[in-house]
Amino acid sequence: MSQSLAAAGTATVPMAELTLAGDLSRPSRLTVPDLLAWPQHEADVSFECATSGIQHHRFTGPLLHDVLSAAEPGFDPARRKDRLRFLIAVTGVDGHHALLSWAEIDPDFGRASVLLAVTIDDTPLDRAGPQLVLPQDRCGARHISGINAIHVDGSYRAWT
């Protein structure tokens, strides 16, 4: 076996990374080890999947709200309702995507405990990337594996 093939066989898989972008004062790139710096929360979740029945998993990770708040979204903090126009688009490496509103995750409004999971069933997700977990969802359609991008958009305006 050539040295290059031998090296390729033993090469480590690169660390998964997600990009925080959009209407943020502090856009960034984060890995699962970076997400471990935030307070960790646990969620036991049951998803009712159309193709494989009910699945039970335990996830741990920081709250999406905490991570995005640290990136300083561009809403006016003096205007409480200004947050209500912000949308959050989450995309996975497989192209799966979901849309949430800031109001869903904000403690003053919906207060949904949406996680950026760094483990599933005690298995670290360092190489696969974090997962979007919405424990309140009955089915797992908004569950995103291998998140590679989160885009915060505050340009939405009411129709006139």
Image: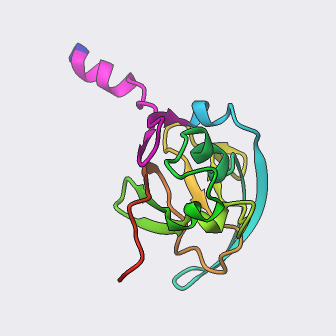
Instruction: Quadrant for residue 113, please give it.
Output: bottom right
Left or right of 40: which side holds 148? Answer: left
Left or right of 99: which side holds 39? Answer: right
Residue 1 visible in the shown view? no
Residue 54, percent across and down? 67, 79
Residue 160, percent across and down? 35, 83
Left or right of 31: which side holds 6? Answer: left
Vertical arrangement, residue 92 with respect to residue 110, above or below: above
Who's the residue at 34% across and 61% down the image?
Answer: 95
Instruction: Quadrant for residue 134, please give it.
Output: bottom right
Vertical arrangement, residue 82 with respect to residue 7, above or below: below
Who's the residue at 71% across and 53% down the image?
Answer: 121
Q: Foreground: 155 or 10? A: 155
Say how the picture is coloured: rainbow
Who's the residue at 49% across and 48% down the image?
Answer: 74
Who's the residue at 65% across and 60% down the image?
Answer: 80
In which quadrant is the N terminus drawn? top left
Residue 58, percent across and down? 74, 58
Write down the region rendered in magenta.
4-31
Vertical arrangement, residue 56 with respect to residue 50, above or below: above
76 is within the stretch colored magenta: no
29 is within the stretch colored magenta: yes
